[in-house]
Amino acid sequence: MPTLRGSVMSNLISVSSLNTKIKSLLEATFMHIMVEGEVASVTYHTSGHLYFSIKDDKSSIKCVMWRSSVAKMKFRIEKGMHVVINGSVSVYTPRGEYQLQAVKIEPYGQGALAVAFEQMKEKLKAKGYFDALRKRPIPKRIGKIALVTAKESAALYDMLKVIEKRWPLIEVIVVDTPVQGDSAAVTIAKALRHADTLGADVVVFGRGGGSVEDLWAFNEEVVADAVFAMRTPTVSAVGHEVDVLISDHVADLRAPTPSAAMEMILPDKNEALFLLDETVERLRAQWHHSLSHKQRSVEHVRSLLIQNAPVRRLQETALTFVRLEEEFLRHMRYLFERYTMRLSPQKSYFDTAMGTILERKERQAHHLFESLLNADPRRQLKEGLAEISRNGKRIALSEIVEGERFSLEDGTVRAEALCIKVEKTNTPPLSKKEI
């Protein structure tokens, strides 16, 4: 083996030393650089770190963004997206690999918040948060309203001023919450959930105008989730009319400003008083018309009642009855006189015939009465003879047995007897002819 000369040996370094020198050179040279390219691959790791690569038409480079920087991003990068990366080159010495370490990522040619807004809009639309069928109508009569906003904000002052002007009878509950800042979205969502438990007829949430960054809390998913889950009808009143936010799409009603929200959902007291006066006048006119009609109806019914009163009907019926009775009596007298004249000869003949018949019938009746008296069994019984009966039924003496009770009766006396002894005689019984 040939021996290396001393000059060559003096230039010899290790792999680690080379990588270290390269690391120092690259990281010192490429600090705070901006690189634009197309996202070739992207992985959101469970640890929270973001691993991706970008490319152009000739080459590509690996990139990484640590979890702390990822948490500050308003949108998610996707494959094929054209981005601008703000960061620096870093070298991993053990493997001699370098990568672009991103601190901030912006969409190429447009703001990050605009991209984030569109991404969130598409995501929530796919979940049904914007469906018109799920939106509830705002009650026409509102007795209690909950205002979710900053307690000392101009927006709250404007809403209270409009309430006092339009409908001061309403009960107002103010739910204080920060409306901008990094943690505002979480506190707004918490305030909305609390307002949903207060029994209000409607919940209005919002704030005054500001930059996109100032209003961004109302574009956060946590606020959209809270609005979507509410049982109380909601009104989004954030910023000015030109500011359209995610909360506007999810809420049941979008108002261009906080003041406009109060004008949209509350009635105008002056208009209500005018309508009330108009209604009172209309009711008064209807009442007078109805009363007049009822009075005419009562008079008509009264006249009918008088005409058809039971006493009057009875009087008329009694008069009719008297008139009919008189006519009937006159007619009967006429008929009686007429038939009397026609029946006079027949009456004389009838009287004579009836007298003869009655006289003959009286003689027959007298004869029958005498025959009846003579046929009375009690008169036919000879002295010393009696009729024998048992239990009201006539029997022969031969039917009586010793110890039996029976009755003896002649024409004038009836006696109860007890048979002590029965003896047969040799005298034959009398025939009917002998009797």
Image (spheres, grey):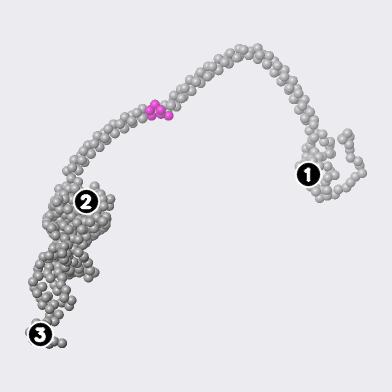
Locate residue 166, reporting x and y percent. Answer: 16, 47
Q: Which residue is mark 3?
A: 9
Asked whether residue 309 is drawn in magenta, I would say yes
- Residue sitting at x 13%, y 65%: 85
Locate residue 87, reporting x and y percent. Answer: 12, 68
1 and 224: which is toward the camera: 1
Vertical arrangement, residue 311 with respect to residue 214, above or below: above
The image quarter containing residue 215 is: bottom left
Q: Is residue 226 left or right of residue 395?
A: left
Q: Is residue 172 left or right of residue 359?
A: left
Q: Which residue is mark 1?
A: 390
Q: CA distance from mark 3 to mark 1?
A: 176 Å
- Disc 1 residue type (three-letter): Arg
Vertical arrangement, residue 411 with respect to residue 141, above or below: above
Check disc 2 and report its element: helix, strand or loop: strand
Q: CA distance from mark 2 to mark 1?
A: 117 Å
Which label sits in the foreground, 3 or 2?
3
Residue range (magenta): 304-310
